[in-house]
Image (cartoon, helix red, strand yellow):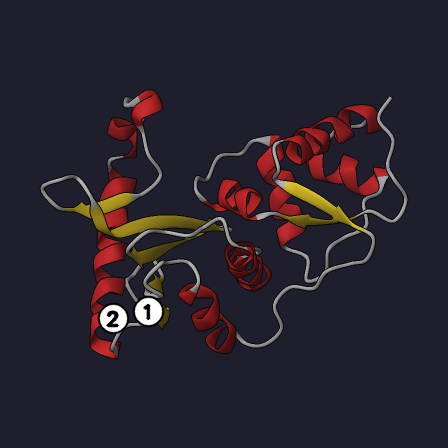
Amino acid sequence: MLEIIPGSYLTVTPYGAWRAVARADDSVERRVLLAILREAASPALSAELARAWTGEASTERALAPLLKLQETACLEAWSTPRMAPVGTLESTLPSLLATLSDTGQAVLADRMGFCLAMSGYPGETGEALAALGADILSVAERQSDALSKLGDHLLDGWGNVDAAGISGLSFWPMHIGRTRLALTVSGRPRFNQNAFAELVWALYVRYGNI
């Protein structure tokens, strides 16, 4: 029988943050991740919360998806609560974006192409990439039915590649609540950083209920 270790405060890992935002599916595991990301402080796990997150009446059944998330390195537990990044998005996002690329260059835009934050680019270049990223992901969204037929070959991001197939610029959708943002990254993406989890956490605290 599954049991809760007292004093377990849950946070979402970088991989869990990726699972939460890469696609807009409605799986039980994703619902749990989103519920945790909406909190400004990591919640203490309880039977009541587990049942509320999963919609299960049985505590045993409610804890099963959380165990799966832990086993797949999407969740981790701490003995003390962690806090979401402090400060306005305008002040916190640029430094987080800088770590998501091996060149230190990244741009985050809304679905209309408005630049929310950038790092490593001159202003005009960043704004142009924000518009480009939003347009590319809009095409992908409109063609989602056709792309779904690719099955296992369907990837999460789009790239600007050279003749050798190497991408110097990539575009990634980020589904934050009902909002779809466009993340543009120059060079090699580095999403396996704590900064990526903190970026997603900050965005979900701000936009997760919209």
Where residue 6 appears, as percent x and y from the top left, is 90, 44
Q: Is 180 situated above or below 143?
A: below
The image quadrant that residue 88 belongs to is bottom right
Inter-mark Cα distance, 1 to 2: 6 Å
165 or 141, which is in the foreground?
Answer: 165
Q: Amino acid at mark 2?
A: Glu
Residue at 76% across, 29% down: 62
**Position of residue 33 in the picture relative to residue 184 (left or right):** right
Label 1 vs 2, first from the N-terminus: 1
Secondary structure of the residue carrying tag 2 is helix
Residue 28 picture quarter: top right
Residue shown at 28% from the left, 23% from the top: 150
Q: How many marks?
A: 2
Q: Does residue 162 appear left or right of residue 154 in this picture? A: left
Question: What residue is drawn where x is 56% and y is 64%?
Answer: 206
Is residue 58 in view from this perspective?
no
User: Between residues 185 and 200, which one lies in front from this camera angle?
Assistant: 185
Task: Provide the secondary structure element on which disc 1 rests.
Answer: strand
Residue topped by disc 1: 115
Q: Residues within 10 Å of mark 1 (few under 14, many from 20)?
A: many
Give x and y (percent) for residue 77.
Answer: 75, 46
| Circle 2 residue | 127
- How dense is the environment of label 2, judged by Cα within 10 Å: few (below 14), some, or many (20 and up)? many
Q: Can residue 201 be seen in this snapshot? A: yes
In the depicted structure, whether residue 145 falls above or below residue 52: above
Q: Are marks 1 and 2 in contact (CB under 8 Å)?
A: yes
Residue at the spot 32% in from the left edge and 57% down from the top edge? 185
| Whole-percent x, y for residue 108 in the image | 37, 63
Q: Amino acid at mark 1?
A: Cys
Furthest residue in direction right, as rendered? 6
Is 27 positioned to the left or the right of 45 in the image? left
